[in-house]
Image (cartoon, rainbow, N blue to C red):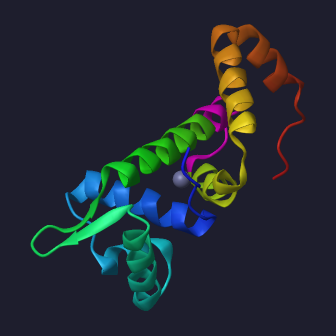
Amino acid sequence: MPPSPSQSAEDYLERIHELIEEKGYARVVDIASSLRVKQASVTSMVQKLGELGYLNYEKYRGLILTEKGRMIACNIQKRHETLSRFFSLLGLDADIQKRDIEGIEHHLSPATVDVLADLAEFFETNPETLKLFLKSRKPPKA
Ligand code: ZN
């Protein structure tokens, strides 16, 4: 495994990948607004990610992920989906989920993500157990 990118680099790769999937391109201005950072920060991170071989800039297509960049972005996306699957089973609100996942996902080790994926699968195949757990919880505070 190549050294993994830093947490904030992961945020960028994740977002660039999402933008390209959604719109077909990832503009600096869109990356900046979706990560709530300055365009200058995006420009310098994009340059760094380019030097590390994760993406390229092409005159007409704009930013594109290299094979290596796409592989990492796909892993990040898969991890996000695992967490989202797990939180959804627990009935957590979509907006809260998204915010919390963005907050923790880059800090989790593969072993932890693995356990959560297994736990999600366990609950999916044992819905009665999940129901039992959910029923055992105190009603949410208003
Ligand atoms: Zn994410």
Could you tell me residue 42's position as x and y percent? 42, 81
**Which quarter of the picture shows residue 89?**
top right
Q: What residue occupies the far left of the structure in this picture?
A: 60
- Nearest the camera: 140 or 129? 129
Could you tell me residue 33's position as x and y percent? 41, 78
**Which quarter of the picture shows residue 4?**
bottom right
In magenta, the rendered stretch is: 85-94
Q: Is residue 116 above or below residue 106?
A: above
In the rendered structure, does residue 126 fall within the stretch colored magenta? no
Main SS of the magenta part reads helix
- Nearest the camera: 14 or 50? 50
Q: Residue at x 53, y 60 (%)?
A: 10
Q: Is residue 11 above or below residue 74?
A: below
Q: Residue at x 33, y 74 (%)?
A: 30
The quadrant of the image that shows the N terminus is top right
Q: Is residue 31 shown left or right of residue 107?
A: left
Q: Residue at x 62, y 39 (%)?
A: 83
